[in-house]
């Protein structure tokens, strides 16, 4: 019998995943384990999977989250079977829930200005929000950003394959606003005689201060990740090719980016009388 704890212990140890991916897999295991604890993973049935769905839905969890948990479970099983040359059927194959159509949440330019205004009292928060809006990076990438990753002369950010979700090196151009923000932050650290190599000096999270700022800005439903959506949406609305947006977001699959394409149509509509 192969239980889910043993499966994930092997998967997390030997899979060549980024740290952020391992965090997601550990989170999935935390949710899956209580339900499948005493079950051989190869004996999992579709009725059992449906039962898990009902339990998670009853807890108020969205289908998209449940699908991510199943994807993690399915990937762990596939990895194990390949390593041990097993000819077993993956019980999670072709099992997924139909998710609601993607509804992106993004800011208008006016809303972004108001949000930044409400961040002005906290220098690092203002810089954090500015860089998310100007680069489209994920929050974790910005918080872990080091000065070595920034080339002020070439105006670029360098991310190694370990720092990206797609496990590929990513080089991003910096806008003037982003470059000026980073230069200002560097000057502040120099004046404070502080240098640990990290742009944000080891700050782990801005969740609480961001929550307060967005509330003051009247943007209660805004999430930090929506700033990445905003970056992409502004590009599409300005006429940027969806393939360029894909490269700037670091998406390995165009399907992840194509969801923004309807915004280009809405932008063009104003030219039709």
Image (tube, rainbow, N blue to C red):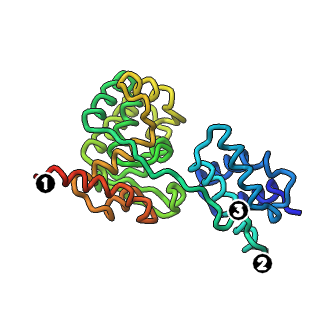
The quarter of the rendered structure image containing the N terminus is bottom right
- Mark 3 secondary-structure assignment: helix
Residue 211 image offset from top left, x and y in percent: 46, 27
Instruction: Work out whether 209 lies above or below 239.
Output: above
Q: In this orientation, which residue lies closer to the viewer: 53 or 19?
A: 53
Lower sequence index among marks 1 and 3: 3
Does dot 1 land on a helix, a strand or a loop? loop
Q: Which residue is mark 2?
A: 87
- Can you give x and y, in whole percent of width and height, for residue 63 in the image? 59, 49
> Badge 1 is on which residue?
272
Mark 3, residue position: 76
Give the distance between the C-alpha atoms of the residues marked 3 and 2, in whole angstroms.
Answer: 15 Å
Asked whether the residues under the numbered discs 2 and 1 touch, taking CB atoms below 8 Å apart as contact, a structural biologist would say no
**Is label 2 in a helix, a strand or a loop?**
loop
On screen, residue 261 versus residue 273, left or right, reads right
Identified at 46% across, 64% down, the residue is 252
Q: Residue at x 10, y 52 (%)?
A: 273
* 87 displayed left or right of 16: right
Q: Residues within 10 Å of mark 1 (few under 14, many from 20)?
A: few
């Amino acid at each position: 019998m192969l239980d889910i704890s043993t499966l994930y212990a092997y998967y997390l140890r030997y899979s060549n995943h980024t740290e952020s991916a391992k965090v997601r897999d550990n989170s999935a295991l935390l949710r899956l384990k209580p339900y499948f604890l005493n079950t051989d993973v190869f004996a999992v049935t579709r009725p059992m999977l449906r039962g898990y769905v009902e339990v998670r839905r009853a807890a108020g969890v969205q289908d998209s989250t449940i699908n991510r948990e199943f994807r993690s479970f399915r990937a762990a099983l596939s990895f194990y079977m390949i390593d041990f040359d097993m000819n077993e059927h993956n019980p999670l194959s072709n099992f997924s829930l139909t998710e609601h159509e993607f509804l992106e949440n993004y800011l208008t330019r006016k809303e972004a200005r108001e949000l930044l205004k409400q961040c002005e009292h906290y220098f690092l928060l203002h810089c954090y929000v500015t860089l998310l809006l100007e680069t489209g990076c994920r929050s974790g990438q910005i918080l872990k950003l080091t000065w070595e990753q920034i080339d002020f002369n070439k105006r670029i950010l360098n991310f190694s394959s370990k720092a990206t979700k797609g496990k590929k090196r990513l080089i991003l151009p910096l806008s003037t606003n982003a470059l000026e923000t980073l230069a200002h932050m560097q000057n502040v650290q120099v004046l404070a005689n502080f240098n640990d190599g990290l742009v944000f000096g080891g700050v782990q999270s801005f969740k609480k201060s961001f929550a307060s700022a967005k509330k003051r800005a009247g943007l209660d439903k805004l999430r930090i990740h929506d700033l990445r959506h905003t970056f992409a949406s502004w590009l599409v609305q300005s006429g940027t090719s969806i393939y360029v947006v894909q490269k700037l977001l670091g998406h390995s699959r165009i399907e992840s980016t194509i969801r923004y394409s309807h915004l280009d149509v809405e932008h063009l509509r104003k030219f039709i009388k």
